Image: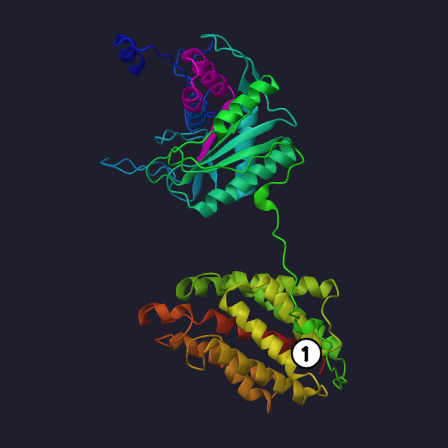
Amino acid sequence: MACELANAEGRRCKVVIVSDDCAIARTGSTTSSRKHTGARGVAGCILVIKAAGAAAAAGKSLEEVAHIANSVADRIGTLGVALNPVTLPGAAQRNTRLDGGKIEIGLGIHGEAGIRQTAMMPADEIAKEMVDKIYDYGYKVGACISGSEQMVEKIKEGEKVAIIVNNLGGTSNFELFLLARSIIVYLEEKVRCKVTRAYVGAFMTSFNMHGVSLTIFAPTGSNDSIETIYMLLDAETDASAWSKVDILSSVSDIRPSLIPLQEEASSQLTTSTVEMDVRPVVIHNFSEIAISSINAACKALIEGEPKLTEWDIQVGDGDCGITMLRGAKEVLKRLDEGKLSVSNPSRLFADLADAVSSSMGGTSGILFELILRKMSTSLIGRDVDRNSLSTAFVEGVQAGSFYGGATRGCRTMMDALIPAADTALTGSLELMAAAALQGAESTTSMKEALAGRSSYLNAETLMNTPDPGAKAVEYILRAIAESVSGII
């Protein structure tokens, strides 16, 4: 209609049809159907418009602009995936066909039904599903001939392609870039083509649609014609939704954003690199005790991750269980690789602090590292026996309390650590674990948190949920006590 109106005004116009939706047959006219609709034009339109606009801005003729636009349109394929369809403002009813944790593959930007529904999948599997469907759909060869089957071709190995990972309206950047990474890895490692440009963002959206579409552009023709189109895509523009991308011109190129920054040489040394005044260890079978304790504590954190996460979702930021899980796995990995000095406590605690530092984020990771480093330095110059180990634990907990600012009653891990430290010099490991349990459970009835993430919450939210950091400490001490009961 716009073209006809413009022509009626004496303006020369040409029509370019974009039909990049790989969820629908390329043409509607077949021997078994009288439909003529054909595939929809979806997010791939963005590349057609960008190339055509840049060509027009460069002064090319109408025929040249139309030819470029058609060249791009013939070599794009798009597929959408969403957790929920579009919300239509003013509609009397909400579209609920995806309620229940399912995803729909191939749905349209206006909420049209797609190819199929399936259970939610990890990002890598969604990436494979999308790429494979576009690959199987193929690209146009020559002009579309109405009413006939059209020849198609696949992406070729080694071919340079550009992709759009498009936010359909309600997807977070975290999800968007996670899927983009999976798509690029699959294209380059499995399909074996080179992604030279990846446009990731909100280019063609629907209202509140929680989904993503993938467009793959595989240009064809001479090298000169391909480079011309890419030059048009790379041309400067003030369009607000368009952004510059890393451009890889060679298969051997390393993506600039993935090149690690060079670290400056540091004169600071970790405790584990300092030559320590290590005294004899007079504890019988210490290495056996250390290995058993580490294995038991890490296993307890790994198994306890679901509960720690559940509690932290209620009273924190939801990452306590995952943080503990990462730390436990890293410690076990280093133990298996022989990177933990299990024969000497001072070096062992320094090695554990290094493992925690490299794998655990957040306040809990910092506090565990501080405690372990203080325990390590506390033992330097001392004969290592049960009394000096207990003293080291007490000094480590005191350091954690000092630097973290929390004490008993603040509703933090200190509510388990401080009671255990109070018992350490006079009691057994079993009594320390029992004290930690009692302290951790006491946080369940605390109506106020004086430190940590929970300090932002009201009494109603806190009640009946223990502090996850305190419970993690209890898991560790209880597991150690149980694991060494038959050794010492």
Q: Residue at x 68, y 61 (%)?
A: 333
Expressed as whole percent of the image width and height from the top left, the position of residue 178 reads 51, 45
Q: Residue at x 49, y 71 (%)?
A: 469
Q: Residue at x 61, y 74 (%)?
A: 479
Question: Would you identify the image quadrant in which residue 34 lies?
Answer: top left
Q: Which residue is mark 1?
A: 484
Few, some or many C-alpha atoms within 10 Å of disc 1 (few <14, some 14-19, many ≥20)? some
Q: Which residues are magenta?
A: 53-82
Q: Is residue 281 above or below residue 218?
A: below
Task: Look at the image and tell me whether residue 371 can be seen.
Answer: yes
Front residue (pair 348, 473)? 348
Is 73 one of the magenta-colored residues? Answer: yes
- Left or right for 118, reference 293: left
Expressed as whole percent of the image width and height from the top left, the position of residue 382 reads 70, 87
Expressed as whole percent of the image width and height from the top left, the position of residue 177 reads 49, 43
Expressed as whole percent of the image width and height from the top left, the position of residue 163 reads 52, 32
Front residue (pair 278, 341)? 278
Q: Is residue 459 above or below residue 53?
A: below
Is 446 one of the magenta-colored residues? Answer: no
